[in-house]
Image (cartoon, helix red, strand yellow):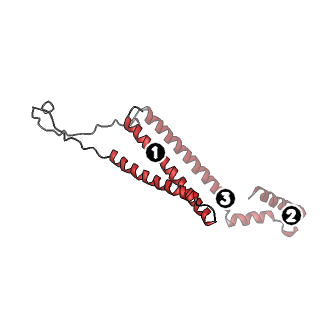
Amino acid sequence: MARPELRRARARRRARLSTTFVGALAIGLGVWGGIGLAAGGSALLLWIAAPVALACVLLLRRMSVVTRRAVAPEVAAPFVRTAAEMQDVALASDRVAWTPRELPRPLTASAGSRAATVLDEAEARAALRRAATEERMRARAEQLRPASLDRARAARDEEFAGGPAAGDEAIEAHVRRLLERRASGQ
């Protein structure tokens, strides 16, 4: 608030905004007056709106010229060294070779550190999890593997060892086993 150039810039901005608003309102009234005139009404709104809109355009143009002048680049004075700033000793070189500072090694890289131990434990747990998952997958694949044809034929022959003469009990037991397997999803 204490800088006068900022206050002036803010006042210019407000004046431009107000002038633009009044000009837009005048143009709107001029359009309305033109429509009214075409419909057979009075030309009063048109006669009022035209000079107001023209005045707003002229004011905005003048404000842009003033703003351009106010923001004109300042010419800087050339830089001149004084005798006190000059150095009177000759140095070997003005350029000093820069070498980057070495970063410390991460704690996980040093053997025996707590961080390395924690990472090793996490890695071991992950390896155990992977091994258990692989073992479960092998067991499931073994379960889902279809039986060989020879074993299936032998099992079928054992079921119906008596053939058609096995009787109703054997057939009923066979049907119950089939229904149990279907219910269990095998």
Quick one: 109 or 137, which is closer to the camera?
A: 109
> What's the CA distance linking mark 2 and mark 3?
27 Å
Q: Is residue 38 left or right of residue 85?
A: right
Q: Position of residue 172 (x, y in %)?
A: 87, 61
Quick one: 71 or 146, which is closer to the camera?
A: 71
Where the C terminus falls, by quadrant? Answer: bottom right
> What's the CA distance linking mark 1 and mark 2?
104 Å
Task: Categorize mark 3 by other alpha carbons within 10 Å: few (<14), some (14-19), many (20+).
Answer: few
Quick one: 42 or 163, which is closer to the camera?
A: 42
Q: Position of residue 169 (x, y in %)?
A: 89, 61
- 2 vs 3, front mark: 3
Q: Residue at x 49, y 55 (%)?
A: 51
Residue wearing tag 3: 144
Mark 2 vs 3: CB contact within 8 A = no
Identified by mark 1, the residue type is Ala
Q: Position of residue 116 (x, y in %)?
A: 43, 36
Chain-order first, disc 1 or disc 3? 1
Tag 2 secondary structure: helix
Residue wearing tag 2: 171
- 1 vs 3, front mark: 1
Chain-order first, disc 1 or disc 2? 1
Tag 1 secondary structure: helix
Identified by mark 3, the residue type is Leu
What's the mark number on residue 15?
Answer: 1
Q: Is residue 62 left or right of residue 28?
A: left
